[in-house]
Image: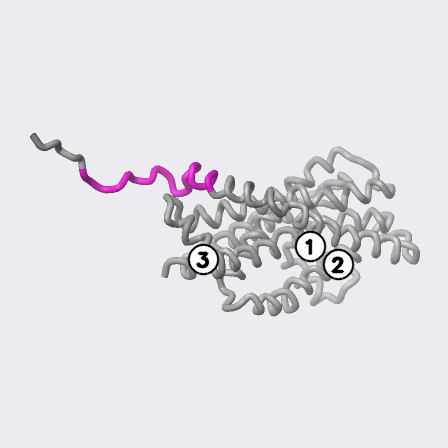
Amino acid sequence: MATAVATGPAPRRLRRLERAALAGVMVREVVNFSSFWRSSTFSSTVDPTIYLLAFGFGFGSLVSEVAGYDYIDFVGTGIVATTVLFSGAFPAMYSTFVKYQFQHTYDAILAAPVDVEELVTAEALWIALRTGVYGCVPMLVAMIFGLDPSWGMLLVPFIAALAGSGWAAFGIFIAAKAKSIESFSYWQSGLLTPMFLVAGTFFPLSQLPEWAQVLGNLNPLYHCVQLVRDSVFQTWGWADVGHLAFLVGFALVSWRLAIRYMERRLIL
């Protein structure tokens, strides 16, 4: 007697972003990260720390106070955003490109019950968690050199992770659009470096010409700097609501762009 075999459509996905799919991709990233965490941590934390020491003690010897703060404190809080950029956008750009172009890692992942939206979301979340940790390093170094501790510092990892999620997604978006790994130079020199310099990290934005101030206000790094600085010095105001809203908006727009262009790259 033949046994009836149940046939029918594949199991329907319960949610748009399945927790199991997100967790699977992130666990893979954690396991993979354990093999290169030393070099990644070194480059993501030492470079900004060198900037902090060079500018803090270099310019700090000439300019003792900026915008009402000791210069080392001013730079120490501002350079958190630089760390977020270094540990968010750049790893996302290069690792994403290598994974889909050379290693074909994403082809293997997408063969499992994971779609592109879940893949991009999990990758961005994992990098955001790292930036939340790395972003605190310059602040801790500045504390060694005199930055007073405050309860507001406890918010810095969350601010860094939020900004880092936006930069991670933006890095994935750049990687999805790139035709070769050499094309990253255009983004780095033409966009990311100018944004890094005009973010209120090393000098107040108010010291720049009016047109530069307008551009600076469109810079996510500037809003990260201001939010971190106001949190550390506990000088919150209504403007911080705007800074927070800008970072959330930047993260959402970058996330959707990353998904859209990665779908084109991997599926269409």
Query: Nearer the viewer's eye, disc 3 or disc 2?
Result: 3
Q: Residue furthest left?
A: 1
> Which amino acid does the dot numbered 3 rest on?
Met
In terms of image quadrants, where is residue 7?
top left
Instruction: Report the disc number at residue 262.
Output: 3
Rendered view: 135 above or below 154: below
Density class for disc 1 (Cα within 10 Å; few <14, some 14-19, many ≥20) is many
> Which amino acid does the dot numbered 1 rest on?
Tyr
Return the x and y of residue 200 as percentages of the image width and height.
74, 56
Q: Which residue is mark 1?
A: 222
Q: Is residue 61 left or right of residue 10?
A: right
Helix, strand or loop status at disc 1: helix
Measuring 64% from the left and 45% from the top, which residue is drawn there?
37
Do the residues under discs 2 and 1 have CB atoms within 8 angstroms?
yes
Rendered view: 47 above or below 211: above
> Which amino acid does the dot numbered 2 rest on?
Leu
Q: Which residue is mark 2?
A: 205
Q: Is residue 66 left or right of residue 32?
A: right
Return the x and y of residue 258 as percentages of the image width and height.
49, 56
Measuring 86% from the left and 43% from the top, which residue is drawn there?
145
